[in-house]
Image (spheres, grey):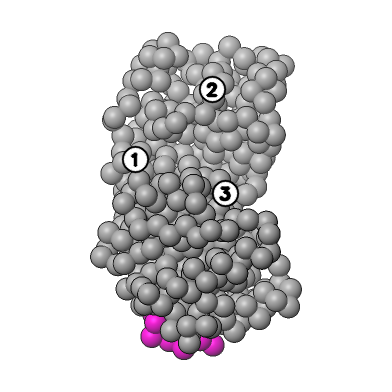
Amino acid sequence: MNILQSLNFRWWNASAEYAISLSKGLSDLGHNVITFSRNGSPASNRAEELGLRVVSPAGMGSKNPLSRVPVLRSMLAVFLRERIEISNLHDGESHFLGAVASLFSGRKTKVVRTLSETRGSKANAFNLFLYRFMTDAVIVTNGWTVDALAQKFGINRERVFSVHPGIDTEKFSAGMFRGMLRLKLGIPSDVLLVGLIGRLSPVKGQYYFVKAASLLSDPRNMRFVVSGRAEEVRHEDLIETARALGVEHLFCFLGEFSDVREVIDDLDIAVVPSVGSEEISRIVLELMSMGKPVIASSVGSIPELIEDGVTGHLVPPGDAAALSDRISELTRKKEKRTFLGKAAREEAVRKFDSRNVARRVERIFEDCLQRKRR
């Protein structure tokens, strides 16, 4: 298939990672994939690093409404020159331009809208028309939004598909960085290391992690790591919280690592205590792929990734006591940690490996080419 992947992302985020990973997976399957993205953006640069074909039209990402005209012309030119069969559009502006370009090309190109974040999609008259009459399929990154989205835009449920992000399970495998973090922090191998990785924000639940540690009856043989860039929450805020709860001596508050595997590889237990968001929970996939026992909040897409008691543990969001109980249980039961980590790794390879995800999207595209827009 000839496929155009359009993504107008200024920053590197989970949505950009999803789009680029999918582009690479589809290309590896033998499809002609063109990445249509703003010049000099992290997504465009990453696509080039991976050897993908990149088109960066002038004006893409500009706030000037008139800049849409040359972007539309460039997209239409790619449609016609490359005989694009599928346009997979990862942002709202690309969705509109792709639908118009498809119309100008005689609707020879199918329009697929991929939504990694559904909260900002408004059911106004313009979007209702765009989704109902100019879009052939919609892909969302979790199952719990499928019915709601179909109802919101009044589109056929059969045209909405759930595809979780893929993970490079060969890259995210245990062993390469083993011992490096412990050496850096001076933590012996017989001390259990429990970690949370994510941007410092109230929604990521760092406070509940610190609170959970303070509720443990005997944390003497444990250390806790928090790694991530400071945003709405500062490292100083978390240090003060830990000090107030009497557990400052047990915590290491680190910045963001350029390679998250440096932190993951040394963890004995991983915690994802988010209280919201997580439509794409990339960190859960990374932890599972590296065979870590994960304790995570049952929010967003996480319950679709982790089967409670089988590939990890789920706890209610914002429940520090429940989180503490699960941490305590896993610290006492090494066999359970091993079982959960092994099962998580197997699940990641079977269901979430980027190649398998690309094959699922490939089947959606093939189905899209065979059916009429309804």
Q: Tag 1: residue type?
A: Phe
* Residue 22 in view in this figure: no
Looking at the picture, how far across and down is residue 361, in whole percent?
39, 67
Quadrant of the drawing holding the C terminus: bottom right
Label 1's element? loop
Q: Residues within 10 Å of mark 3 (few under 14, many from 20)?
A: some
Marks 3, 2: nearer the viewer: 3
Q: Name the quadrant containing residue 155.
A: bottom right
Q: Name the quadrant containing residue 69.
A: bottom right
Q: Is there CB contact under 8 Å for labels 2 and 1?
A: no
Vertical relation: 103 (above or below) 30: below
Mark closest to the chain's N terminus, 3 or 2: 3
Q: List the residue tagged with mark 2.
A: 254
Q: List the residue tagged with mark 1.
A: 172
Residue name at image x 43 percent, y 84 percent:
108
Mark closest to the chain's N terminus, 3 or 1: 3
Label 3's element? loop
Q: How many marks?
A: 3
Magenta-drawn segment: 367-374
Q: How far is the residue under mark 3 from the one under mark 2?
A: 26 Å
Vertical relation: 221 (above or below) 346: above
Label drawn at residue 10: 3
Q: Tag 3: residue type?
A: Arg
Marks 3, 1: nearer the viewer: 3
Looking at the picture, how far across and down is residue 79, in whole percent?
43, 74
Q: Is residue 130 magenta?
A: no
Q: Tag 2: residue type?
A: Leu
Q: How far is the residue under mark 3 from the one under mark 1?
A: 26 Å
